[in-house]
Amino acid sequence: MGVLDEIVKLNRTPVLFIGSGISKRYLYKYPAWEELLEMSFSKFEPDTFQYQKHIDSCKRSKMSEFETNVYMGTLIEEEFNKAFFDRKIILNIGNKKNPSWVKRGISPYKMFLADFFKKQKLNTSAELVDELDKLKKLKNKVSAVITTNYDTFLEEQVFSIDFKVFVRQHELFSADSYDIAEIYKIHGSATDAESIIITKDDYDRFKESRKLVIAKMLTLFAESPIVFMGYSFTDENVREIIEDFLSCLSKEQLTDIRKHFIFVSYKKGEKRLIEIERTITTKNNVEIPFVEIQTDNYGAVYEKLGEITPGISPLRVRETRKVVKTIVDQSMLSADAQSIIVGIDDLADMDLTSKPLAIAIGYKENILNKYGYGLLEDKLIFEDAIYNNKGFDAEAMCYERLKNIAITRLMPVFKYVKGQEIPKDSKLHAYIEAHNSFDKIISKNVAKTLKNVNAYTNFDDLYEYMKTAPNCRKAAMAVLKNIKILSVEDLRKACKHIFEKYPNEFLHDSNAERCVLCLDLMENYQ
C-alpha cells in the first residue's frame, strides 16, 4: 500500500504546504527564484555580466544557494529603489510622477514584484488544464493550505472565494481564523506589497516570528496529515521550517509520522509515483523517517487525494464554527444571557442546572480572547489599536475590560470609547481626561528624556533610523520626539514596525506603549 493510500484510508483531509514549483507548473513563464532575481536586476542594469559578477562573488564567499538568493534580493531592492527615485525606472502603478504608495513608504521594488505576480496568467497547455481541473476538485478534500508563494493562483484559480486568505504572520491566530478552509501566505502576497519577504531583513524578521508558523502547523497537524508540494528537498528555508516543526512533536506523534508527513517532488518525465524512504534530522538530533514521492504526474496525486470522502466539507465546517461563535457573541451582549466557557472534558463535572450553556467551537485561547473581555491580554488590545484586526465589541470593552482602568496605566482606549456614553464619575472617564492630548501622553518628564533624540523633517528619514535603532526603547523615543510631523498612516507604520520587530520587549517599554496611545488618539479621539 502506497503512502497516499494510507492517507485515504485514514480519511482525514490533508493540509497542503505549497511552494513555487506548483505555480511554475500552472502559470505561463512563471520564474524560479533565481530567474526572478535576474529579471529584476535587468530593470536597472541590462548587462547580465554584472549580475554574474555578484553571483560569482557569493560563490567565492561559500554562500549557499539560499544565502545567495537572499543576498541578491537585498542588493536588488536597494539598487532598484535608487533607480526608481532617480526616475530611471518607471512603474505604471498609481500616479506616475508621485504615487501615493510612495508616500506610504512602500518599497518600489516590492511594489514592482506585487504588480508582476498579480499579472501572472495560466498556462493553457491542454494536459496542464486537465491536471489543474483535478487539483480544483480537491477544494472540498483539503482542510487548509500553507504557501510561500506571492502570487494569487491558489486563492483565485483553485480555491476561489471559498477559502479565506491570511497574509500577515500575526493573522495566523487572529479571532477570524478557524483553522480550516483557509490559506496562509507566510511569505507575503502580491495583494499586499509590504508583506513580501525578499531581503535579508525580511527573512530575519520571518525567522524571529517563524514560531507562529510552527504553532499553526502543530494546530493543523493535530487533525490532518501534511503534504508538501512544489518544493525541492534541498530548499534551505523550507527544511528549517520542517526541522523546527518536527522538533516540536511528541514521541507518540513521531511514531507514525510517515503516514502523516509526505513530500511530493518533481521528477521530469516520470509518470509513476516513485516512493523513496528519506530521513531528516531534527534540531534535537533525532532522525525522522518520511516518504518522498517523485513524479511528473501530479494528476495521479490529486486523483488519489480525491478519494478522501469527508463527512462534511472543510468549507461547511468553517462556516459552522463561524456561526456558532456568532451566536455566542450575540448572547454575550444580551442583558439576561449567561454563559460559561468550559472544555469538553470538563462537562461531566459541571453543574449546568442553574445556567444556560453557550457552546463555541474553536480553541480555548481564541474563545477566551474574543468573548471573555475581562480576561483580554494587554497585547491583544495594543495589536487591535495598531492593526484593527480583532473585532472587539466596543461596549463590552468599555464596561468589562476598561471600566476600572487606573489613571496611571498606558492603554489605547479611544477606539472603544468612541460613540459610547461614558459616565463622568467613572475611572474610564478620568483616564480619558488624563490622556486626551499628546502633551498628556508625553508628559514633561518623558519629554525631558527625549531632549537629545534627533528631530527629523520627514517620516522617511525617521523610518530609516528606526530600522537601525539599537533597541525597542530607542526606536519608540524617536517616534515620540517627532510625533507632530507624522500622519496617522505614518504613525501606524511606525507602530507596526516596533510591534513586529520587538514582540517581546513591546509591552515592557512604556515609550512603545505611548506610541500606540498617540496613534489611538490621532485616529479615534473626538
Image (spheres, grey):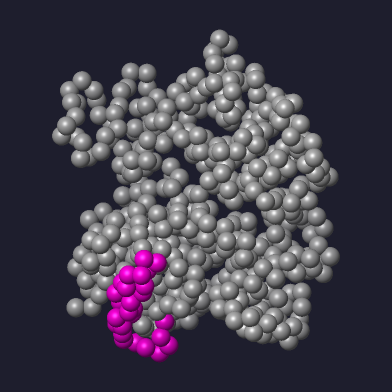
Q: Is residue 441 above or below residue 5?
A: above
Q: Which residues are magenta?
A: 266-293
Front-lying residue, 353 or 51: 51
Front-lying residue, 253 or 323: 253
Residue visible at 23% across and 78% down in the picture: 2
Residue visible at 68% across and 45% down in the picture: 475
Residue 246: x percent and y percent? 35, 64
Direction top: furthest residue: 425
Q: Is residue 316 left or right of residue 450?
A: left
The reply to whether residue 231 is visible in this rendering is yes
Residue visible at 67% across and 61% down in the picture: 111
Q: Is residue 294 above or below residue 207?
A: below
Q: Quadrant of residue 12?
A: bottom left
Residue 37: x percent and y percent? 64, 75
Direction bottom: furthest residue: 269
The reply to whether residue 114 is visible in this rendering is no
Q: How many marks?
A: 0
Residue 207: x percent and y percent? 52, 60
Looking at the figure, which quarter contains the N terminus? Answer: bottom left
Q: Is residue 488 left or right of residue 228?
A: right
Direction left: furthest residue: 348
Q: Is residue 161 above or below residue 363?
A: below
Residue 309: x percent and y percent? 23, 62
Residue visible at 64% across and 34% down in the picture: 514
Q: Quadrant of residue 376?
A: top left
Q: Is residue 261 left or right of residue 464?
A: left
Q: Quadrant of residue 52?
A: bottom right
Q: Is residue 78 left or right of residue 184?
A: right
Residue 280 forms part of the magenta stretch: yes
Looking at the figure, which quarter contains the C terminus? Answer: top right
Front-lying residue, 198 or 441: 441
Residue 153 forms part of the magenta stretch: no
